[in-house]
Image (spheres, rainbow, N blue to C red):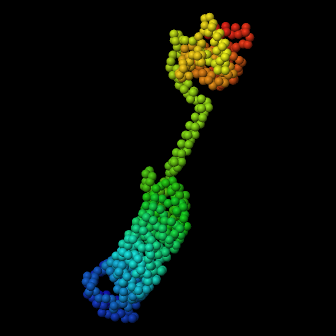
Amino acid sequence: MPEIASILEDMPKLVEVELTDCRFLGTGRWEMQIQAKQSQTLRVLTIEKLSIEEFYLFTDLRDVESLLSLLTKITVQNTKVFLVPCSLSKHLQSLEYLDLSANLLGDQSLEHSACPGGWPSLQTLNLSQNSLSDLEMTSKSLSHLRKLILLDISRNNFGEIPDVCDWPKNLRYLNLSSTQIPKLTSCIPPTLEVLDVSANNLKEFGLQLPFLKELYLTKNQLKTLPGAAPIPNLVALSVRRNKLNSFSREEFESFRKMELLDASGNNFICSCEFLSFIHHEARIAQVLVGWPDQYVCDSPLAVRGVQVGDVHLSLMECHRSLVVSLICVLVFLVILILVAVGYKFHAVWYLRMTWAWLQAKRKPKRAPPKDICYDAFVSYSENDSDWVENIMVRELEQACPPFRLCLHKRDFVPGKWIVDNIIDSIEKSHKTLFVLSEHFVQSEWCKYELDFSHFRLFDENNDAAILVLLEPIQSEAIPKRFCKLRKIMNTKTYLEWPPGEEQQEMFWFNLKIALKS
């Protein structure tokens, strides 16, 4: 130590001294007096990794107190300092910057080191990586430092913190990162402009800090951005490496003064809303720190590992529920329309009839002669039943020889499907006799019967059909779907029921000949 003192005496204009990786024996003595005009320029002292083997023999620094009073910046890192004597602190009248990081200062020793009257000009204090554990006591020990602006007490183990703390009035910067704080309280001073609470496993942030401009929440457990209302003047925000999976346009725009946002290192869910906001927000590239390389999708699985800015989802992927709903609605409407149309136009009947006709197509074109039971199957409207049953049936079935007629009222098998009855009756009849009238072409029943009849009979291109007109009827009155019937009426002869008795006799004669042919 005397050698160091002599060096200081020989260098009166020395400004900065740095001692790194030094070892002192601890037996030296400061046997000197610093003259008033010597070494008045020394302002900065840096000591790193200093070890004193027999520190209990180390003399005090009383002889160099006048020299220490000139220092404005002192750094003593990783030297196992556990106490700064109060008397020494009081002589550091000009000290503005003090770094005591990576030492052994505890709550009690800090209270003694920062005694009233000590460090009166101090503006920056670094106590990171020490043995502090009581935030309330730490704040109280430093509360008299009226000029203190920046305080770093990171990497200490505070744990739970109280609701009320007494801080220096002008404190603007506070670093509480890696201090094992599970939840923030109103102990945090409201005067802060910069707050670092990174690496504390925080799940939420809701402090009212009206003057805060920079907030660092890196390596916590936040799932959403903090609310903007309690921190209206925020300019820079870091939520890097949290559990944030997205943020909305409303959240982003709520920070009106935001200039920098670091949300990198999060596992983003690339939903349609999030991607739409990212692709259409003009300020994204200017505000997001690390954009676009450090913003990667974690889900959906198809885009995992892809940069958020490169992902574009399709309409189906973005509005799947809406698309499925629309498809379901359209399918329902189509089914509803089909049911309505089918009901109106008797689609079920025609389907069943078509199926029966297809089944009938597999059968022989005409039943063997031994299976013919009737001379004619009579198709007529119920409104014409009086003429059919009382006049035609009596005339034909009482003739000599009598004709065997098949009438649906009389000869259809009860309980059997109507189409099957029609098919069987036509196939077991030598002829099919249609009694046509205005009632016939307007009757739904006759339409069904006529439909199948022209399927079965007219497709065979034979003369098994006999047309009898009870009254004049224009071919145009016949429904368009009966095109073959209309064609037959236009190209072939048919019998017409006359009003006079003499003409009626000729009508019956011709009808009987037609039935026998």
Q: Quadrant of residue 435?
A: top right
Which residue: 41% across, 77% down? 136
Q: Residue at image x 58%, y 16%? A: 410
Residue 59: which quarter of the image? bottom left
Residue 221 percent location from the top left of the image? 42, 63
What x and y, as percent, mark residue 341? Answer: 60, 33
Q: Quadrant of residue 429?
A: top right
Question: Can residue 178 be seen in the rendering of this structure?
Answer: no
Residue in the picture at 56% in, 22% down: 418
Say whether residue 173 is left or right of residue 513.
left
Residue 4 placement (x, y as % from top left): 31, 87
Q: Considering the image in quadrants, where does the C terminus appear?
A: top right
On screen, residue 336 versus residue 123, left or right, reads right
**Residue visible at 51% across and 48% down in the picture:** 320
Using the rendered image of the protein, determine whether residue 230 is visible from the camera's viewpoint: yes
Please state the horizontal and vertical placement of residue 363, each as a whole percent of the image. Answer: 50, 18
Tally the numbered discs: 0
Image: 10 above or below 266 = below
Is 481 in front, or is 236?
Answer: 481
Q: Quadrant of the N terminus?
A: bottom left
Give whichever of 375, 235 is nearer the camera.
Answer: 375
Q: Nearer the viewer, residue 9 or 146?
A: 146
Question: Above or below — where is 179 with respect to 327?
Answer: below
| Residue reaching furthest to the right | 500
